[in-house]
Amino acid sequence: MTRHNAAQHLPRSGRRHRHRLFAALLVLPLVFGLFAAPAIAPGPVQGDELSDAQAQQAALAKKIQQQKALIAGLNSSQASLQGRIAVTTGQLNGITDNLAATRKQVNALAKDIDKVKADYTDLVNQLGDLDLQLKSIGQMEEQKKAELGQRKAELSQRIRDAWEAERTSLLETFLSGATFTDMLKEMSSQLDAAEQDRALAQQIALDRETLLSLHQTVVATRAQTNTLRQETAVQKQKLDAHLAALEKARAKLVKLEKAAKAALAQQKAQYAKMSADKAKLRTAMAAAAAAKKKLQRKIDSLVAQQFNNGNIPSQYNGTLRWPMSGSVTQDFGCTGFSWEPPFGNCAHYHQGIDIVAPYGTAVHASGSGRVVYCGWNYADGADPAWIVIIAHSSSLTSWYAHMTPSCPVHAGSTVSAGEVIGHEGNTGHSTGAHLHWMIEFNGNFANPRLFT
C-alpha cells in the first residue's frame, strides 16, 4: 500500500486522533505562553485602557499629595492659631491696659480661624471627590473583571473547538491529491484561526495588566484616603477647640470692656465731683501732695535703717512683675483727671498706675524684698488708704495703695516675688475699687513699666 493509500485508508478514529493532536500542537504554544507568563510583562505600556488606568493612578496619587500638603498647611495654621490664642488669653487674664488693641487681636484671630475653617471645608470636599473617583475606579475594576472572564471563556471555547474539530491536515490534503489552491485555502484558514487566537490571548494579557493596575490603584488609594480621613478628623477637633477658645476670649473681652468702662466712668464722676469746688480741690491736692512727701520721707528713713542693718541689698538684680491682673484705667504720667496734682510741665500728673479688678482680688509682690510698711496711710488725713510698701534695694521700693485693711505680711518680714501681700480695696481717697501701684526709684516716683 502506498503512503498515499495508507493515509487514505486509515480508520476514521485514527484520523480524528491525529487531527486533535495537530490542533493541540497549534494552540499549545499559545496557551503555554499565556498562562506561564508573569502577571505584568515588562516593557512599555500598551493599550488605551491600560494607559488610562495608569493615568488615573498617577492623577489620584497627585491629588492625595495635594491633600497631604493641605493638611500640613492646616497643621501649621492651627499651631500658629494655638500660640496666638494662648497669648491673647494670657493678656485677657493678665494686664489689659489696652483693651482696644486686644479687641483688634481677637478680631484678627476670628478672621484667621475663618480662613482655617474654609481650608478645612475645602479638604472635606476634596476628600468627598476622591471617594467618588475611588468608587468609579472600583466599578471599572469590576467591569474589567467581567470582560476578562468573558475573554478567558471565549479562548477556552476556541481551544476546545480546535481540539474537537474534524479538520483535514495539510499533509492529508496534499496526499489526497488536492490542488495547490486547496492547500493554500486550508493554510489560510488555519493561519486565520491561529491569528485570532493569538490576538485574543494578547488581549487577555493586556486585560490582566489593566485589571491589576486598577486594583492597585483602588487598594492604595483606599488606604491613603482612610489615613486622610483620620487626619481630617484631627483637624476638626483642633478647629473646634480653637473656635471654643475664641468664643471664650470674646466673652472675657466683653466682660473686661464693660468693667473698665464702668470703672472709668466712676472715676471720672468722682473726679468731677471733687473738682466742682475749685478752691477745695486746690486745698485737697496741696494737702495730698504734702502728705505724700511726708510719707515718702518716712519710708525713705525706714529703708535706710533696713539697709544699714544689712537687711536689704544696695541694688536689685532682676525685673519687677505686675502685682495684679486687671484693666489699667489710668496710666503713669500726664493725665486729664483734674484731681491729680501738677508735676513738671503737666497740669495734672499721675505718679502710678491704676489697675481695676473685682473687689478683693489678690495683690502680689512685684519682686522679692523686705516689707517696710503695712498699714494705714495716716498722712492722707481723716480718710487714709491702706498701703503696703516693699523695699527691693536701698534705691528701689514698690507701693501698693487703696487695699483692704488686712496685713498678710508684716513690716520687717521678707517676701518673694509673686507672694500675696494684700487684696484690692477701696480705702482712702479712692474713686472706686482699684490698686494704685507706684515705683519709687532714687527718691523719685518712676513709671512702673520701666521695671517690668
Image: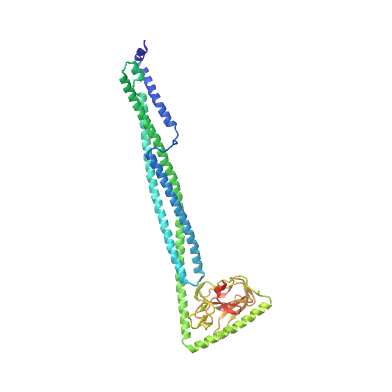
What residue is shown at x 41% (from left), y 47% (from top)? 60
**Residue 378 falls left or right of residue 125:** right
Residue 437 placement, left or right of 204: right
Q: How many marks?
A: 0
Q: Is residue 170 above or below residue 427?
A: above
Residue 89 percent across, percent down from the top left: 49, 66
In the image, farthest residue toward the top = 1
- Residue 109: x and y in percent read 45, 64
Q: Position of residue 404 (x, y in %)?
A: 55, 78
The C terminus appears in which quarter of the rendering?
Answer: bottom right
Asked whether residue 234 appears in the rendered view, the answer is no
- Observer-nearest residue: 24 or 377? 24
Q: Is residue 195 left or right of residue 269?
A: left
Residue in the foreground of this view, choosing between 346 and 22: 346
- Quarter holding residue 391: bottom right
* Front-lying residue, 325 or 183: 183
Q: Residue 317 location in percent, x, y?
A: 62, 71
Image quarter (top left, top right, bottom left or bottom right) of the N terminus: top left
Residue occupying the point 46% across, 50% down: 227
What's the coloring here?
Answer: rainbow
Q: Going by the picture, which residue comes out furthest to the bottom?
A: 279
Q: Residue at x 40, y 49 (%)?
A: 130
The answer to whether residue 18 of the structure is visible from this angle is: yes
Q: Residue at x 32, y 19 (%)?
A: 180
Q: In this rendering, is residue 116 above or below 334?
A: above
